[in-house]
Image (tube, rainbow, N blue to C red):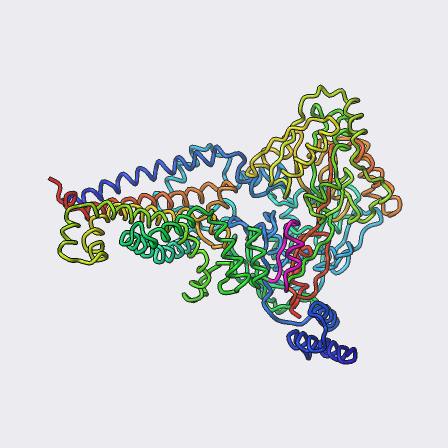
Amino acid sequence: MNEQLDYMTGRVTAGKMTRREFMGKAAALGVSAAMASTLFADAARAAGPAKGGHLKMGSVGGESTNSLDPALAASQVPYHVLYNFGENLVQINADGSLNMRVAESIESSADAKTWMFKIRGGVEFHNGQTVTAEDVLKTMERHSNEDSKSGALGIMRGIESMKAEGDVFSVTLNAPNADLPYLMADYHLMIQPGGGMDDPATKVGCGPYMVEVDEPGVRHGFKKFANYWDDSRGHVDSTEILVLNDATARMAALQSGQVHVVNRVEPKVAALLDRAPNVNVHNVGGPGHYVFIMHVDTAPFDNNELRLALKYAIDREEMVEKVLRGYGSVGNDMPINGSYPLFDDAIPQRMYDVDKAAEHYKNSGHDGSPIVLRVADGAFPGAVDAAALFQQSAKKAGIPLEIKREPNDGYWSEVWNKQPFCASYWGGRPVQDQMYSTAYLSTADWNDTRFKREDFDKLLLEARAELDTDKRKALYSKMGYMLRDEGGLICPMFNDWVEATSTDVMGWEPTPSGDTMAGRWSSALWFG
Amino acid sequence: MHPILKLVAQRLALSFLLLLAASALIFAGTIILPGDVAQSILGQSATPEALANLREELGLNEPALSRYFSWLGNALQGDLGTALTNGRDIAESVGYRLKNTLFLAFWAAVVSVPLAIGLGLLAVRYRNRWPDKLISGVTLASISIPEFLIGYLLMYFISVKLGWFPSVAMINDTMTLGQKLQAIALPVTVLTLVVLAHMMRMTRAAILNVMQSAYIETAELKGLSGLQVIYRHAFPNAIAPIVNVVMLNLAYLVVGVVVIEVVFVYPGMGQYLVDHVSKRDVPVVQACGLIFAAVYIGLNMVADIVSILANPRLRHPK
């Protein structure tokens, strides 16, 4: 029987046997369907990507208000649309290393202040123009100049000047930054002809697929760009993104075969969905985390004893179990976890401790009035439940929490970053420096805990300029301890990305840096 | 002038004033909502500079009143403007969505109105016997279950388990009529179940009311059969309240189906409006609001006119 099976898997690898034939013959040999399916998948993977087919994704996070302008992308559907028709200078691989896209190679000056990106030759826009360093320069200018309304404006701040010479695009920074190439992987920074200065929402990009249908809030269709430079990407003839905001509709569409990929599988249905035939559920731990944030400059949260009391009064294990149903990991009151490079895993994990919480609460001298925690389900999925669990675990330590429910609508403009204690989430960033500079530097716009410490800022700048990784790791570790013990962030959990594909789709690779293979499902998956 | 024409003219003038009032109300409502379009577009990751630049570009720094009047001036000339959020022409995108909404509403009405009236007639014919009780029981049960739940149930059994119809009712211009009808089969079923009871019960009640009259007894004494009595004599005299209820339900099918649109991912006006309200995109909200108000006012006017035409006493006032 084994010989027969070996022969059959060989045929599959050679592309001479279809799934249906294989499954039928394997069943005849008495192999269970699950086993045969695994064998087939292995054999098909060994064969390498097959070409052709129409790949469809059902995605959350699309509105009829969406635009093709990369500067305005803020939710999942525009994100995936951009990765279908656009391309960055660089992208981040599943293992956290850099993947050279429009940039062919990167060099820096010894002080990490000037960075040179050599532009790959022969990369074409969908209108036939060749991508030049000038296009790259204009793109970066549009995201960083005075009139910019780009979502990437925050990360472009440290740039002093940029220029294009021949096929080299170079950036000079105000201060050294060893992580600059990672910043260029931001999804807003898709290279556009002329930087999109004349037509920001142009359909012309330089990604593996061309825009064919653009119906915001309904669907987006793409077809393979014949002159795409990289043969190892973009295996299907055409792709489509259906906007399926309703979770039940999304799962039903996958199960009934109307889409092949879905994102944002709710943890409470993930295990059930995995049991359905023809569906694979994938999860991978990422840098995204759910948080409760306190303004450290506002009473009563200006008292570190009270902050510590609250940090000890939250039961992280229970939250991962009940809110994430195990699809996640516990947090340690800092925004960094093992998915980041240079993470110090020796920092001790903070646990739920009623005695310590009660002790710190007593030391804080709080007057016993209820502490108001503002929350809405829009803050993160399950935020209201998480707050209720927090309230219960804090009660056991004698800390009264009052939960105030806020409407989802307007939560980000009226509650988050305005009220002193509320629920929120962070999608994470590719590197520690970026995460810390986005939300914990004194001057950061999104310093949503009002954590303003000169010594912390100094460490951050020192680490940014440090090219020796061991020294950098030590500096990041110090910063981690500072936030964990003195910051305004209560981070109970890091959420996994949970996505699902139909079983006829091959090539899935767990990618921590973003939703659904960090947007690259369309260029990496194929039909087996 | 013919009194009916005069009435229509009066109603039309009044409707115009009503629409104007509605537009002012909608505008005021969107101003009161917290947050603005710039903040909503850029979301959590907006820097203050980016917000300021976007506000400037969208003209949000103008006072609210002058924004309203400049919108009104353009709208009166037939220019609905462009969406603040993605710069698309509003008339064009609303037109596309409106066409879809009307398509769904039309087919739901084609199925549900004759069905409801037919069932109502049957219920009267067999009143207080088992067909009447069965019809009332089933339709009342279907109106009492929340529509999204019916949607999910149908989706699970009919699309996931049986695979007869798709769970995603996404239609587009490249599809043939047959493909479109197949795509909307499930939402049409749900909508039918939702509006059936109301129209059916009204038909039944209105006809039963007429059935007490002396001329019905005469008709029966003439020897007409049960259904013929109802169809020839009772129904024409009960038409006014039935048309009223039918129009109300048609209006619901056009303006109130956002939940069904979300569940079945149907590209209609409801979802479109909700998206733009949550982004505070005032010109689009205004345009949708006006269309919805116009549909409502228009259908009510039709109901009034039909009931006048159906009643000789109102048709020839002294």
Q: Which of the pair B206/A69 is nearer the observer?
A: B206
Relative side of A246 to A368, left or right: left
Q: Is residue A23 above or below residue A347?
A: below
Q: How many marks?
A: 0
Q: Which of the pair B58/A92 is nearer the observer?
A: A92
Q: Which of the pair A473/A307 is nearer the observer?
A: A307
Residue A305 placement (x, y as % from top left): 78, 26
Image-quadrant location for residue A296: top right
Residue B311 placement (x, y as % from top left): 18, 46
Q: What segment is highlighted magenta in the picture?
A: A260-277
Q: In the displayed orientation, state which residue is furthest to the left.
A: B318
Q: Which of the pair B124/B184 is nearer the observer?
A: B124
Does any portion of residue A352 appear in the rendered image? yes
Does any portion of residue A167 appear in the rendered image? no
Residue A386 placement (x, y as % from top left): 67, 38
Q: Is residue A17 above or below residue A422?
A: below
Relative side of A221 to A468, left or right: left
Q: In the displayed orientation, state which residue is furthest to the front.
A: B129
Q: Is residue A346 above or below residue B181?
A: above
Whether the magenta-drawn stretch holds residue B201 is answered as no
- Give the quadrant of the N terminus of chain B: top left
- Give the quadrant of the C terminus of chain B: top left
Whether the magenta-drawn stretch holds residue A273 is answered as yes
Residue B203 placement (x, y as % from top left): 29, 49
Q: Residue at point 36% right, 50% down?
A: B136
Q: Is residue A90 above or below residue A408?
A: below
